[in-house]
Amino acid sequence: MRDDETLAFDYLANLHGVDYEDRMEVYYHFYSYKNRQSVAVKVKTDREQSSVPSVMNIWRGADWNERETFDLLGIHFPGHTDLRRILLPDEWVGYPLRKDYVQYDEEV
């Protein structure tokens, strides 16, 4: 998508994850400045072993978006060079944007 001259989707505008009861999904929003077109791509993954290959080596802007999606939803991105929490402390238990998230500390 990025290197094909007819497509030329050179900009990753957004990447985010969504939790459904039976699956997880990652949405990518790309833009081609050359063609002035946008496209959205949806990738479904298993809810229990959620994993989608990283696109960080293709679109460098995916770095923090993949980390945020990992941090809040627990979706793993194999191939990401620095996949660690970005918003929550390392000792945080669970992934707060999951539908089945149970608050560890009730006072929070």
Image: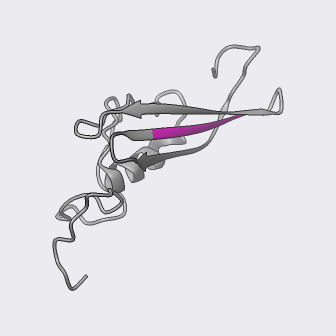
At 83% from the left edge and 27% from the top edge, which residue is drawn?
35
Q: Residue furthest front?
A: 21
Q: Residue furthest bottom?
A: 107
Q: Position of residue 97 (x, y in %)?
A: 36, 60
Closer to the camera in the image, 49 or 36: 49
49 relative to 21, above or below: above
Residue 83 position by quadrant: top left
What main secondary structure does the magenta stretch of the protein show? strand
At 21% from the left edge and 66% from the top edge, which residue is drawn?
102
At 82% from the left edge and 27% from the top edge, which residue is drawn?
34
Q: Position of residue 75 (x, y in %)?
A: 32, 43
- Asked whether, in this view, residue 66 is left or right of residue 95, the answer is right
Magenta-span inclusion, residue 99: no
Q: Is residue 6 visible?
A: yes
Render colour scheme: one colour
Q: Position of residue 90 (x, y in %)?
A: 21, 61
Which residues lie in the magenta part? Answer: 26-31
100 relative to 69, above or below: below
